[in-house]
């Protein structure tokens, strides 16, 4: 009898354990974010550090963002043209490409690429710092590793991501224009003119930038937290890096739905 | 040398971001820097808008001269009110200008077409266009056609 009760209770206990553990991790991550940001503005750990982080997070992601943006734009142009020409409204191609990129694909695909390219690198870097006891050494010397390591990285991601998102959208619109105008024969005036008539600077461009800012913060936060919280072994770092990419990608996609719902004002 | 290159690259990156934002504003969203201050608002009452929305074009002879800024229903007279901004460059709209809701192409978006009158007074800020023609609603048109067919 007692055996049976235990058998029923065990999985429930495991569930409770898992819930408590993830709640604890979430709380740690929140305290971690708050205490790293509280160290002040972007230049609080020295301006040179911030520049270095923007370089490694932002500038070095530029090539993948530009190439991906151009191809996404070209595919949108091709698919959009095929669908729109059924209704005889190829002239709306520019509108379709630009709104899709600015509202959704720009921030989201940039966020996903950013998680894979910059997020994993951040986690691996900080995880290795922890494994080689550089972080403990800093604490021994009385230097706060949060302020010295985490704060400039968080700000770097927060600053770099919206710029990358904007460049992605812009290159994508050019890609769509290239395919639409030069290869498929959409009227150039209609492409740009209809686009300008239906894209709003505040409604579409700036809301896309807000999305990018949120994604930048969340992806960088997950990446540095996973690195800082990783088990300092080679296995621990590898699982932390995987977790970063998975969690950050899911966070981007999930948050995108919430942000879109708020921005469209339908919920 | 290494930091100089890095700082330069970051500088270029930031400039690219700003340029992208400006390009978005000017080339993609058509936000014009001369937007503020050189526009005036006029109103028109319509019986049926048939899908005219905010940000729709206001054009004269096919040239865009303004934009619809607000659309609402007058709660007392039950007519739709359209507020539109016209560029100051077109300040010579006569008071008997007529407005019609037109469609771009067969399935295209709705816009307002203005036709100038012969009066020698001009519409000013807050002026009202008296002579309006509602949107053609396809369903009503088909209904009328069927009705007149049945009478014969």
Image: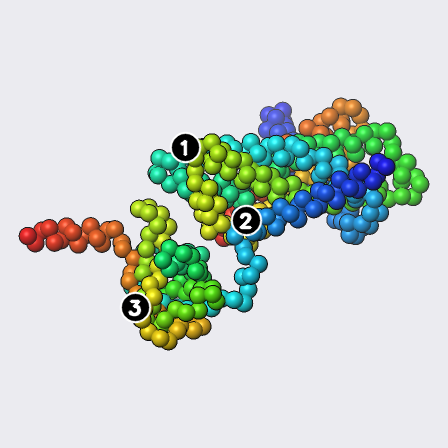
> What is the number of the mark on residue B27?
2
Q: Quadrant of residue A23?
A: top right
Q: CA distance from mark 1 to mark 3?
A: 42 Å
**Do the numbered discs 2 and 1 sit on residues whose CB atoms are within 8 Å?**
no
Q: Which residue is mark 3?
A: B131
Where residue B60 appears, as percent x and y from the top left, is 37, 60
Residue B66, visible in the rendered structure = yes
Furthest residue toward bottom? B121
Q: CA distance from mark 2 to mark 1?
A: 25 Å
Q: Chain of mark 1?
A: A
Q: Secondary structure at mark 3?
A: strand
x 62%, y 41%: residue = A167
Q: Which residue is mark 1?
A: A82
x 84%, y 47%: residue = A46
Q: Chain of mark 3?
A: B
Q: How many marks?
A: 3
The foreground one among A209 and A19 is: A209
Where residue A10 appears, as percent x and y from the top left, is 64, 29
Residue A254, visible in the rendered structure = no
Choose mark 2 or mark 1, whichever is in front.
2
């Amino acid at each position: 009898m007692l055996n049976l009760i235990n058998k029923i209770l065990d999985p429930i206990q495991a569930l409770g354990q898992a819930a408590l553990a993830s709640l604890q991790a979430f709380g740690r991550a929140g305290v971690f974010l708050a205490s790293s940001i509280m160290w002040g503005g972007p230049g609080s750990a020295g301006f040179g550090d911030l520049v270095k982080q923007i370089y490694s997070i932002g500038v070095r992601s530029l090539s993948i963002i530009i190439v991906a943006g151009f191809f996404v734009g070209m595919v949108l142009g091709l698919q959009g043209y095929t669908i729109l020409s059924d209704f005889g409204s190829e002239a709306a191609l520019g509108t379709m490409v630009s709104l899709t990129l600015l509202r959704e694909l720009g921030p989201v695909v940039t966020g996903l690429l950013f998680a894979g390219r910059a997020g994993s690198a951040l986690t691996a870097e900080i995880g290795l710092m922890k494994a080689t006891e550089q972080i403990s050494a800093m604490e021994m010397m009385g230097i706060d590793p949060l302020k010295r390591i985490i704060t400039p990285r968080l700000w770097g991601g927060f600053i770099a991501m919206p710029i990358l998102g904007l460049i992605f959208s812009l290159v994508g619109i050019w890609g769509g224009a290239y395919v639409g105008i030069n290869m498929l024969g959409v009227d150039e005036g209609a492409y740009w003119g209809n686009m300008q008539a239906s894209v709003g600077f505040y409604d579409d461009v700036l809301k896309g930038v807000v999305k990018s800012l949120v994604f930048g913060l969340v992806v960088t936060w997950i990446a540095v937290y996973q690195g800082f919280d990783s088990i300092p072994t080679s296995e621990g770092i590898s699982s932390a890096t995987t977790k970063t990419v998975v969690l950050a990608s899911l966070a981007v996609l999930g948050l995108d739905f919430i942000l879109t719902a708020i921005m469209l004002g339908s919920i | 040398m290494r930091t100089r290159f890095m700082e330069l690259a970051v500088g270029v990156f930031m400039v690219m971001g700003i340029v992208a934002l400006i390009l978005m504003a000017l080339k993609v969203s058509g936000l014009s820097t001369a937007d503020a201050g050189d526009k005036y608002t006029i109103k028109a009452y319509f019986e049926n808008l048939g899908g005219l929305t905010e940000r729709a074009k206001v054009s004269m002879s096919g040239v865009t001269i303004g934009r619809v800024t607000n659309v609402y229903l007058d709660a007392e007279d039950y007519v739709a009110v359209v507020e539109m901004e016209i560029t100051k460059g077109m300040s010579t709209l006569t008071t008997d200008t007529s407005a019609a809701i037109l469609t771009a192409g067969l399935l295209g978006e709705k816009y307002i077409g203005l036709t100038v009158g012969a009066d020698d007074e001009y519409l000013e800020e807050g002026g009202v266009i008296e002579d309006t023609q509602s949107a053609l609603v396809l369903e009503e048109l088909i209904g009328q056609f069927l009705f007149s067919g049945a009478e014969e």
